[in-house]
Amino acid sequence: MKLAYQRPRLFEPLTVRGLTLKNRAVISPMCQHSAERGIAGAWHLVHLGKFALGGAGLIFVESTAVAQSARIGVRDLGLWSDEQIAPFKAIVDFVHENGAAIGVQLAHAGRKAGSQALWEGGRALTVEQLQETGEPWRRVAPSAIAAGPEWSVPEELSIDEIAATRRMFVDAAERAERAGFDVLELHFGHGYLVASFLSPHSNHREDEYGGSRENCMRLGLEIAADVRAAWPEEKPLFVRISAVDGTEDGWDLEDSIVFARELKAIGVDVIDCSSGGLSDETRNMNVPRGLGFQVPFSERIRREANVMTQAVGVILDGQQAESILQDGKADLIAIGRQALYDPYWPHHAAHALGHDDGFEDWPIQHGPWLAKRAPLMKKLKFTDNSVRSLTGSGHQLGETGQ
Ligand SMILES: Cc1cc2nc3c(=O)[nH]c(=O)nc-3n(C[C@H](O)[C@H](O)[C@H](O)COP(=O)(O)O)c2cc1C
């Protein structure tokens, strides 16, 4: 008797509010440092568009600044100005035409505004270098504490400036809606502005935005509530957090569980569970990197805050992703560097899990050709439809094909 086909969980659709994702494979936000005046260009269209062709259910645009002065790097994308909307819309349309959903990650870099791309060294820019750009830059934080020895001391935000910062997120969210994005993600991790309010290491305030956990969470909760009110009811809102800030005695997983409960109560749909990045010295000192190293954060937040989660961090293949989902440790799987290595990761994961043997999920321009090629690959004994096994497999072209 033939067993009924069981679709892998990675390829089961997921409905969040009014959006149904075709699968659980998400492309994690990844800074490209390739924009002019915060405007998306051909690089972004190809970079993000290829992931739509690659089969992802949801693709995140990199960290996108809510203010020019609050960029992570000189060539970040932005949504601080209306001129940035139309170029995003072109990318959104392409991704939609090719069957994927697309979200944008909104960020305020806080005291970590102004750093180099990794290929330039990845260091903090000096105050002089920032001035040389001729552009507005401002390092701000809950308290006047630098992010590390390389960083200048930030300005402490006043209560009025905090209110203005909340408005920046709302304005950017409204522009994201006009660009047609399906999902918004608020970047509250990696030591940027909201993360710096959460951690007792960077937040020494004595007013209602510092001191107790409740006060440290206030800005993040206010921004989430403001954005939730401005962002259409039927569209999902995600929040990326550093589940632990990477320091001793800092913001920890227990804090994140409480924060996730509060975010959920406000209407945040998915907690994207990253970690670390609060400051230069600490980075991820107490979070050893390994396969799926942040999955335990996702698992506990999902279970104890009863909220959907996205797992991220060294998730490399379909089987690993499938196990995380099957074990109830996450609802979505975000892929970062592995998707840079293999933009067709979701399609390849599907084949590895025995799904979509007919290449029906592939772009129509490609799938039928690959389906036609499949019997030939089988005849040539290339079981995974690639020729990786050519090296060291003993295959000799011309021998096996006859
Ligand atoms: C090139 C690059 C740029 C990144 N930019 C962002 C970003 O804009 N926002 C963010 O939250 N994380 C960013 N990250 C972190 C990734 O989203 C992801 O969390 C991290 O790489 C771990 O996942 P991985 O092991 O699958 O790469 C970036 C990572 C890379 C490799």
Image (cartoon, helix red, strand yellow):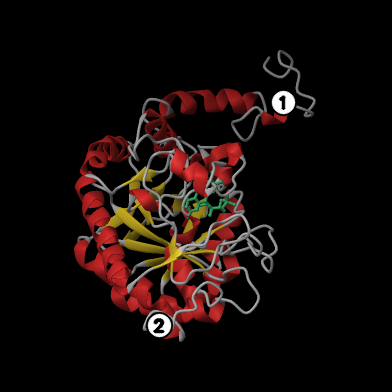
Where disc 1 sits, the SS reads helix
Decide: few, some or many residues near mark 1? Use Cα within 10 Å; few <14, some 14-19, many ≥20.
Answer: few
Where does the C terminus fall, quadrant-wise?
Answer: top right
Q: Nearer the viewer, residue 315 or 60?
A: 60
Decide: few, some or many residues near mark 2? Use Cα within 10 Å; few <14, some 14-19, many ≥20.
Answer: some
Q: In the visual, does 214 lie left or right of 66?
A: right
Distance in Å between CA atoms under marks 1 and 2: 59 Å
The disc at residue 110 is: none
Q: Residue 356 in the image: x percent, y percent? A: 47, 41
Image quarter of residue 44: top left
Q: Which amino acid type is shown beneath numbered disc 1?
A: Leu
Q: Residue 159 in the image: x percent, y percent? A: 31, 74
The residue carrying mark 1 has its beta carbon less than 8 Å from ligand 1: no
Mark with earlier residue (1, 2): 2
| Viewer can see residue 4 | no
In the displayed structure, 326 sits above or below 73; it is: below
In the displayed structure, 392 sits above or below 211; it is: above
Q: Which amino acid type is shown beneath numbered disc 2?
A: Asn
Q: Nearer the viewer, residue 138 or 178?
A: 138
Q: Residue 339 in the image: x percent, y percent? A: 53, 42
In the displayed structure, 305 sits above or below 310; it is: below
For image coordinates 59% across by 70% down, the residue present is 296
The disc at residue 390 is: 1
Front of the two marks 1 and 2: 2
Q: Which residue is mark 2?
A: 215
For image coordinates 37% across by 25% down, the residue present is 365
For image coordinates 75% across by 23% down, the residue present is 395
Q: Nearer the viewer, residue 86 or 356?
A: 86
